[in-house]
Image (cartoon, rainbow, N blue to C red):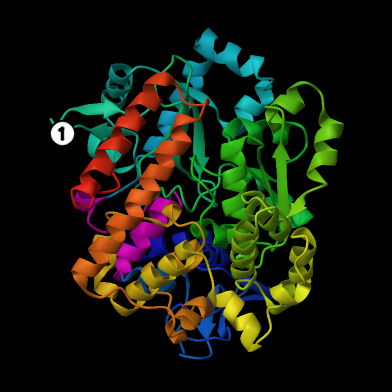
């Protein structure tokens, strides 16, 4: 059994706002925080988290407890399992009454990171690369940047230190191949330790300096590492984020290091993945304005577009900053353009404005059919926003599409406006039908996720994620359920046929985008082209193809 002293010591370390806020979005309400209750369906938030009492209480269903109770109820864990999960994510060593079953943490990731840091000092190629990028020695130390050697060297180090290979696999430091052999996940790479919000190391990011095919890799998914919920350097940026009520979200580790070095200590980065709905609870903490700072190339604009839709539909304030001409924040700081960077960061394009501009830019507005499609798509997006934002940006949309009366983009309840909003693009309608199918047939969710994920959807990623997570109190899901014009995909065969059609279009679109990319190496591009073509051929034969 876990000792009571150990449990009390763990409780003293936990912050209930951090724990609950990593699962659901909390909004400040005076000295407390509120949210719709995750344990029952409701429209008005009655779930309150009290930081001074370190407890939560729902005035609707009566749910009540501390951090441990919340994790038990939310994750469906028993008491010891919840304690062990919280201890693992906080890098806390638990003590047990039975010494023969003692489960003290080895601090494996911390030990490995200390070793990586020592190896960096001895590797001239790696240190030269960092110095050429303009990174100071003080930043290397502050961010714990290191260097991972060859796979045999890492395995030998773990063996010499008598560190458990099972724990190393569990924590994503090493992997096990199909033949049972162990291998290091980070080989000849500069390493960036990734921390939880409490400051514990939960994984690594690694950048190759010897030409490996993948430029960046991250730790594998584990009980303590979920790249869709973490933000690089958040533990270092948190104080500045709360103080400034602003957060800068970038695409890369080095951008964050250089921004902090230049005084922008409220910068973080996603972990090699696009911004997702799972990041929102963390971004919501402290209620900051969110500034998405991405490259101005095609891929960066596409990522900024998706982020803008997600953040605007979720009610975030802030905007988009794009770095044109092949520059990024790190390049600007290295070349001494601090004032220019500061000016750029203070001129963001608001999320809704950016999303509408990107939508409209896809169409030839001199063509009447294109103009109509642009209007329908943009109006459908506006419908996902608050009534105030709908009213404000319907006028903006009318001004952007010349020759269109503002009455045509009215989002009122008149029959005419209702008809316009219902004439969404085919893709909109298909996505909404899929979401309604998931709501009404939740038993298909697990098998469905083998073939499709939210990143494939272009318009309704928030609703899709809410549906697969069973968040039936989400207001948009209620609207979808009540809308009789959104049809459910009937039967397994009907659903399969719809998925094959959708996936064929998706992979053909991805293949077309890939052939025009210049940022991908020839070998990697060739490999991905083969993968996409193989999937398209299988779909033509009537087979559903898995994501991986």
Q: Is residue 167 above or below residue 353?
A: above
Which residue carries the number 1 mark?
A: 178
Give coordinates of residue 222: x percent, y percent: 34, 48
Residue name at image x 56 percent, y 42 percent: 232
Q: Which residues are magenta?
A: 77-102
Give the quadrant of residue 171.
top left
- Relative to 386, 168 lies left or right: left
Give coordinates of residue 395: x percent, y percent: 79, 69
Number of marks present in the image shown: 1
Name the one closer to the observer, 447 or 211: 447
Look at the image and tell me whether residue 252 can be seen.
yes
Q: Is residue 304 above or below residue 115?
A: below
Q: Residues within 10 Å of mark 1 (few under 14, many from 20)?
A: few
Name the one closer to the observer, 214 or 304: 304
Residue name at image x 71 percent, y 40 percent: 322
Q: Is residue 247 magenta?
A: no
Q: Is residue 84 magenta?
A: yes
Under circle 1, the secondary element is loop
Residue name at image x 41 percent, y 66 percent: 430
Give coordinates of residue 73: x percent, y percent: 37, 75
Q: Is residue 45 above or below residue 182?
A: below
């Amino acid at each position: 059994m876990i000792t009571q002293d150990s449990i009390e010591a763990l409780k003293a370390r936990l912050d209930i706002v951090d724990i609950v806020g990593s699962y659901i979005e909390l909004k400040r309400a005076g000295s407390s925080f509120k949210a719709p209750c995750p344990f029952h369906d409701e429209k008005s938030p009655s779930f309150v988290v009290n930081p001074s009492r370190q407890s939560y209480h729902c005035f609707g269903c009566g749910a009540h407890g501390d951090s441990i109770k919340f994790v038990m109820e939310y994750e469906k864990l028993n008491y010891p399992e919840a304690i062990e999960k919280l201890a693992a994510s906080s890098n806390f060593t638990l003590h047990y009454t039975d010494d023969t079953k003692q489960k003290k943490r080895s601090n494996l990731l911390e030990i490995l990171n200390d070793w990586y840091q020592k190896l960096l000092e001895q590797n001239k190629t790696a240190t030269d690369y960092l110095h050429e990028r303009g990174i100071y020695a003080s930043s290397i130390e502050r961010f714990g940047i290191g260097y991972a050697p060859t796979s045999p060297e890492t395995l030998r180090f773990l063996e010499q230190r008598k560190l458990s290979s099972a724990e190393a696999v569990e924590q994503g430091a090493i992997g096990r191949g199909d033949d049972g052999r162990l291998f290091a996940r980070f080989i000849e790479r500069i390493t960036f330790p990734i921390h939880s919000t409490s400051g514990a190391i939960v994984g690594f990011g690694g950048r190759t300096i010897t030409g490996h095919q993948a430029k960046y890799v991250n730790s594998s998914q584990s009980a303590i590492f979920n790249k869709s919920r973490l933000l690089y350097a958040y533990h270092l940026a948190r104080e500045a984020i709360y103080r400034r009520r602003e957060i800068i979200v970038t695409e890369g580790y080095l951008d964050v290091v250089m921004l902090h070095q230049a005084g922008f200590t409220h910068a973080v980065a996603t972990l090699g993945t696009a911004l997702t709905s799972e990041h929102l609870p963390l971004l919501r903490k402290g209620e900051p304005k969110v500034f998405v700072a991405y490259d101005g190339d095609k891929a960066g604009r596409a990522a900024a577009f998706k982020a803008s839709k997600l953040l605007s539909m979720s009610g975030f304030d802030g905007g988009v900053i794009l770095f044109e001409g092949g520059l990024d924040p790190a390049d600007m700081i290295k070349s001494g353009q601090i004032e220019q960077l500061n000016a750029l960061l203070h001129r963001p394009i608001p999320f809704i404005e950016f999303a509408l501009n990107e939508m409209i830019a896809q169409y030839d507005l001199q063509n009447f059919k294109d103009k109509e499609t642009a209007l329908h798509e943009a109006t459908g997006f506006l419908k996902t926003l608050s009534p105030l934002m709908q009213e404000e940006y319907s006028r903006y949309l009318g001004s952007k599409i010349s020759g269109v009366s503002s009455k045509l983009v009215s989002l009122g309840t008149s029959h005419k406006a209702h008809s316009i909003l219902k004439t969404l693009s085919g893709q909109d309608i298909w996505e909404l039908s899929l979401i309604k199918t998931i709501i009404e047939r939740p038993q298909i969710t697990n098998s469905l996720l083998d073939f499709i994920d939210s990143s494939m959807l272009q318009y309704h990623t928030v609703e899709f994620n809410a549906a697969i997570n069973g968040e039936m109190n989400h207001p948009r899901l209620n609207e979808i359920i009540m809308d009789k014009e959104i049809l459910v995909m009937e039967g397994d065969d009907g659903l399969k046929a719809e998925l094959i059609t959708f996936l064929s279009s998706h992979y053909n679109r991805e293949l077309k985008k890939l052939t025009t990319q210049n940022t991908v190496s020839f070998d990697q591009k060739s490999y991905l082209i083969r993968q996409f073509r193989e999937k398209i051929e299988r779909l033509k034969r009537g087979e559903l193809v898995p994501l991986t």
